[in-house]
Image (spheres, rainbow, N blue to C red):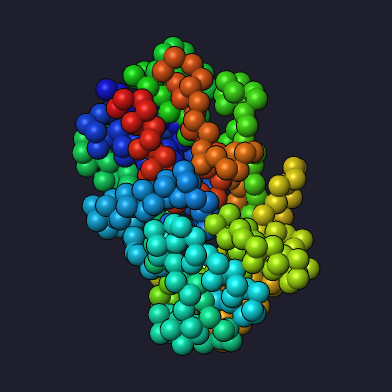
Amino acid sequence: MRVIVVGGGVVGTMHAWQAVQRGHEVVQIEREAEARGASLRNFGQIWVSGRAGGEELDTALRARELWEEIGAQVPDLGFRANGSLTPVRTDREYAVAEAATRRPDAAARGYEVLTAAEARAANPALRGAFEAALWCERDAAVEPRTAQPALRAALRATGRYTFLPGREVRDVVGPGAVRDDHGEVHAGDAVILATGAWLSGLVRELAPELPVRRVRLQMMQTEPLGERLTTSVADADSFRYYPAYRSAALDELNAEQAQTETAAAHRMQLLMVQRLDGGLTIGDTHEYEHPFAFDTLEDPYDHLTEVVESFLGRPLPKVRRRWAGVYAQCTDTTRVVHREQLRDGVWLVTGPGGRGMTCSPAIAETTANELGW
């Protein structure tokens, strides 16, 4: 079988991985020289902890298994099973963390409430003030800026994979066939459109009523911390954002303990991961109203800096980069992904939202199984 994958981000690349692993030939087409969207502009978190139960958690847990398997084959992914800590400071925040450990699926996530001393033993870089922390053993991390090139190098080594950058697919010209803006036709047995947040052009033409929206976020990365941050780190505002933490305790937190003005205005939470070079990736905000701003705002970065410094108990290293990114999210946020057959031999896979990096291996595996690869 010959599979044409359109889109060079992590969802597209994982579809290419699944096809090649099953013995098929793949041509992957990317409109940029390298993917430049949400697949790079993220934390590199394999984030199980906050996922809703049922299909979303099952997908995340399966993806976590696949990431570990792929990481063993492709060391340059930088896979590490680092887990996460969410420090809490108030009784209401503690109650939400404790309620999470009583979920029926808490053991599958590896939830445990740690004392402050236990949390600092797990992550000695957390020298700031907090009372306890929610530990999630199943969370992990990879390197988002190098993941796709590393995967492509492994795919090329099989002899059954071709990457064609700098080409935009313009038309579907038959079952399993597309034409790019160089006028070249790429024919196969299946076409997977995994174009991420690029929902205009051909995607709009093929799926004008697509139930997917775009979300913008701001993030930053620092110079090396100078010590290991042994776990990913979140703050209690993440309880308000992720569906796994919904409970009576969360209702009380939302009613009685307000976010800061900046955090509320920008729908913020803290997520933080250390890169292999020692720098910290820190975010984020959420913007849903179109048209998105073209610039970034400083108040959210000031808020994130304050929260991080309060956990670390030390000044943040110099910020090296700031950026904004856009990802595609199903308008029904309970759906893991939008998967639709658009034409004979042509499928669109998009809309995983902030779950794309986490869930992409399992999303691609499901596509491969459903298509009978």
Side of 119 where 315 appears, left or right: right
Q: Is residue 169 visible?
A: no
Residue at horizontal 43 percent and vertical 28 percent from the top: 192
Observer-nearest of 248 and 62: 248
| Quarter of the image where the C terminus is located | top left
Question: Residue 367 placed where, x, y %?
Answer: 39, 32
Q: Is residue 368 visible?
A: yes
Task: Residue at the far top: name it.
Answer: 174
Residue at horizontal 32 percent and vertical 44 percent from the top: 152
Question: Residue 170 placed where, x, y %?
Answer: 53, 22
Question: Residue 369 placed where, x, y %?
Answer: 33, 31
Residue at horizontal 46 percent and vertical 57 percent from the top: 104
| Quarter of the image where the N terminus is located | top left
Vertical side of 42 occupied by 136: above or below: below
Vertical side of 109 occupied by 353: above or below: above
Residue at horizontal 25 percent and vertical 37 percent from the top: 21
Q: Say which quarter of the image contains residue 161.
A: top left
Q: Say which quarter of the image contains residue 140.
A: bottom left
Vertical side of 300 occupied by 32: above or below: above
Observer-nearest of 21 and 183: 21
Side of 198 where 4 appears, left or right: left
Side of 46 where 100 appears, left or right: right
Question: Residue 324 placed where, x, y %?
Answer: 62, 55
Side of 298 where 99 appears, left or right: left
